[in-house]
Image: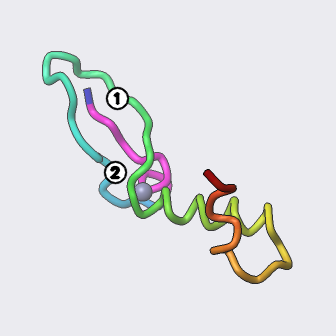
Amino acid sequence: MKVVCVWCQQEGKPAILREEDPQDHGVTQGICEHHAVVLLARLRRSFVSGTGNPRTVAHDGR
Ligand SMILES: [Zn+2]
C-alpha cells in the first residue's frame, strides 16, 4: 500500500512517502518529514506562545 502525505497532497505536490506491502494496493495517510516539522513548530507555537524560546520546552526532563 502507498503511504501519502495528506499535506503534500493538499498542496498538489508529489505525496507518496513510501510503499509498503506491494500486494496491497490501498492508500494510507501519513505525514512527510517536512510537514512533520511544520506541524510540530505550529503546535509548539500554540503551546508556548510568548516564551520566545522553543528550546526550553523541547522535553520535560528525564
Ligand atoms: Zn508533506
Which element type, helix, strand or loop, lies under badge 2? loop
Picture coordinates of residue 48 (x, y %)?
Answer: 80, 68
Using the image, determine if residue 60 lies above or below residue 20. below
**Quarter for ligand 1?**
bottom left
Which element type, helix, strand or loop, lies under badge 1? strand
Q: Please report the bounds of the magenta region as a residue range.
A: 2-10
Mark 2 within 8 Å of ligand 1, using the beta carbon: yes
- Outermost residue toward the left? 22
- Outermost residue toward the top? 23
**Residue at image coords 69%, 64%:** 44
Picture coordinates of residue 12 (x, y %)?
Answer: 41, 59
**Residue at image coords 14%, 16%:** 23
Q: How many marks?
A: 2
Left or right of 22, for residue 48: right
Picture coordinates of residue 56 (x, y %)?
Answer: 69, 72
Q: Amino acid at mark 1?
A: Val
Q: Quadrant of residue 19?
A: top left
Q: Amino acid at mark 2?
A: Ala
Q: Is residue 3 magenta?
A: yes
Q: Quadrant of residue 57?
A: bottom right
Q: What is the basis of the colouring in this image?
A: rainbow
- Outermost residue toward the right? 50
The N terminus - image quarter: top left
**Camera-side residue of 26 and 39:** 39
Q: Residue 9 — which label?
A: none
Left or right of 57, for residue 8: left
Picture coordinates of residue 2 (x, y %)?
Answer: 27, 33
User: Mark 1, residues whose alpha carbon is within 10 Å: few (<14), some, or many (≥20)?
Assistant: few
Residue under label 2:
15
Q: Earlier in the sequence, mark 1 or mark 2?
A: 2
Q: Residue 27 — which label?
A: 1
